[in-house]
Amino acid sequence: MNSRIKPVSRLSIVFILAVVISGSMLTYFSVNNISNLKELTEKKILEEQRGLSVRYLDAIKNNIENLANKFSDELNTHGLLIDSLLKAVSRYDCIDQLFILNKDGTFIFPNFPRLQKNISEASFSDSFKTTFEAGEKAEFVENKLKTARQNYLSSLQLSTEKADSAKAINALGRIYLKLNDFKNARACYQQIVFNYYSELSPDGFPYVYYAIQQLIKISNTATIDEMASMIESALGKMETGAISLNFITEKLLIQIGRWTNNNSFHQQGQLAHINKMIDKINLQLNFISEYETELPELLNIEATGRYLSVGNRYRAINAFSGGSGELILINTNFEKTVGFVVDREKLLAEILGTDIQSGFDFEYLSVLSPGNMNSTEYYLKYSSELLPFFPGLHIQIMVKDENLIKEFITRRSWVYGIASILILVAMLLGIILILRDISREKQIARLRSDFISNVTHELKTPLTSIHMFAESLLLGRVKSVSDKNEYLSIIINESARLKRMINNILEFSKMERVKPEYHFVESNISLILKTTIQEMAYWLEEEKFEVVTELDENISAKIAPEEIKQAFGNLLNNAIKYSTINKKIIIRLFKKANQISIEVEDQGIGIPEDQFDLIFNKFYRVDRKEGISGTGLGLTVIKGIVDAHNGEILVTSTVGKGSKFSILLNK
């Protein structure tokens, strides 16, 4: 008894001393912190503000690098996929404009070429020119509109290039308008919109501009939807660069906007879609107007190395033509230069909208300002310049509600006071817990010791029998064939008994390490029980047991047959082991409601009612004085197997009269 108390007492003393010393130190620091809490809180706020400013700078850098890296799939060494780039840009609100430049700084996208004579005119054939000029003479000089129409139709038939066809179709549309043949005029201009949208007139203007203007003039309520579809098609091509922009594009967009706003469309959202495309094209025109001069200069700046590398071979350059200090990302590593204009206000708004303040004790108000502005409204304020991406722009960080500082100090004072009390409670609780844990460890150690002793005894009995009968056979002491067969039968049965004990230990080991895997198959349970009874017939006969079986035939279920056989075998083995005087075992198998019931009933020593739940614990054995050996694992293994089948094991018992174990399985 003393040997069991001494270790507990020593550990308790060590634990109490450790807790008392650490608790005293914590109490001292708590009192000291309460007296200096205001100063410490202000220092903490400034540290959090600095940390928050660093987070903003890191977030800006990461967002810009992510933007650059997002476009790696849209760029390749053979050129630029404009459609793919435009789709990618549309996913980010902070990108205002995509642009693509030649090495000389001229725009490829937005498509805004300088006005020049249409070079395609040189490809006109002599017959086309002659016929077309005859049409122009008949139209403008002689005022013979039908003759002009015929000449233009002839020139269309003589055209060999798309530029020829576009020129002839445009002239035909004009003649049809003069002849008040609006149907054919509309058909001509529709061809230009859908088939010749990229062709330019000799003056350098797209024919589609003339077509749209004329279509608007001759539109009526019957053609509104058709007209809207043509305008959507033309605007979409202007937005993606398929139709070039020029100095009259803005006027054309105004004309289109007036027409759309003065009409009603059957398709829901069509007006909004058209206006959205007009806005995007106007943004391109504004971009050209603002950056046409500065972009070539920025490329020269980039060439001198005055830039910031941001990943994916992009360089970040600050530009001021837009009036708000946008950031431009440029990549010059391909045949064409590609870049994006990043709106700093939108980018910073996205960052401010994120959960960037997580982990701080206080909530802060962040304000962007063009300079390091002083404010008397907040006595705790931190300002930081957003270098290197946005020079001259500062972020001001203030505590959102200064009243929270007083509340924080008060709350911390309470926390430190309560913490001291909790330390005392923890000491008492710790003592209780450590005593309980030590007691539990000793109990487990005792059970393990008993388990080893019982296993040794359990294994020794069959091994002794196997060794004795095998030695007798080996030395030739047994002469008759019947005796030899009997000896061999004993060896086999003792080996089977040994195997069952080892299987129990192995099954328990699997349950302790990992969840065992069971292979469920449709099986005849009655046949499994009969086979198990037959395998244990030797011990039943040896111990002179009366076995009564009440088995319903052909009861099948989806089970793990070997494991169910092992569970039933353990129950039968326990019935044999714990029946000392009345040696009768009743085995039943029947269906009960939606369950299958397997019962093993004996007339043995019985189990006290207060130990029904304990007998399924590992290593636990009922404390009886009959000298019956065992490992304390049989029922543990049975319960594990039954649980794996989503079943239930029940026990009823009376001390001195026997026990009945029931395994209930779902059908």
Image: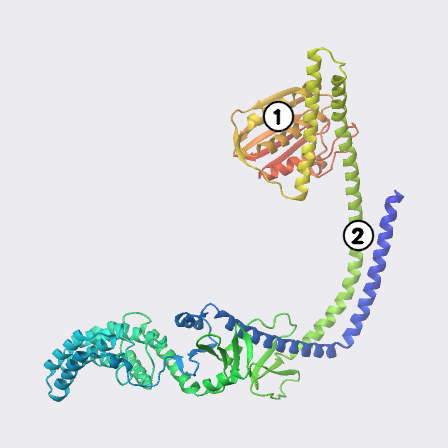
| Mark whose residue sits in front, 2 or 1 | 1
Task: Tell me which amino acid carries mark 2.
Answer: Ile
Q: Is residue 578 visible?
A: no
Rendered residue at 11%/86% (across/down) = 143
Residue hosting label 2 = 434
Quarter of the image that includes the N terminus? top right
- Taking the image as shown, residue 250 lies to the left or right of residue 4, namely left
Question: Contact (CB < 8 A) between labels 2 and 1?
Answer: no
Distance from the alpha carbon under mark 2 to that under mark 1: 47 Å
Check residue 161 in the rendering and tell me which mark sits there, or answer none: none
Label count reads 2
- Spot occupied by residue 456 in the image (x, y as percentages of width and height): 77, 32
Instruction: Say above or below: 345 vs 576.
Output: below
Q: Secondary structure at mark 2?
A: helix
Q: Residue at x 14, y 85 (%)?
A: 139
Q: Is residue 255 left or right of residue 68?
A: left
Residue sitting at x 64%, y 38%? 640
Packing grade of label 2 (10 A; few <14, some 14-19, many >=20) is some
Task: Estimate the x, y position of residue 398 in percent, counting from the top left.
Answer: 62, 81
- SS under mark 1: helix
Which amino acid, mark 1? Thr
Q: Position of residue 305 (x, y in %)?
A: 55, 82
What is the crowding at mark 1: few (fewer than 14 residues within 10 Å), some, or many (at least 20)? some
Answer whether residue 168 is visible to the viewer in this image.
Answer: yes
Residue placed most toward the observer, 303 or 52:
303
Q: Residue furthest front?
A: 126
> Which of the two residues, 351 or 357, is positioned nearer the viewer here?
351
Label 1, on which residue?
Answer: 532
Residue 436 versus residue 108: which sits nearer the camera? 108
The mark that comes first in sequence, 2 or 1, is 2
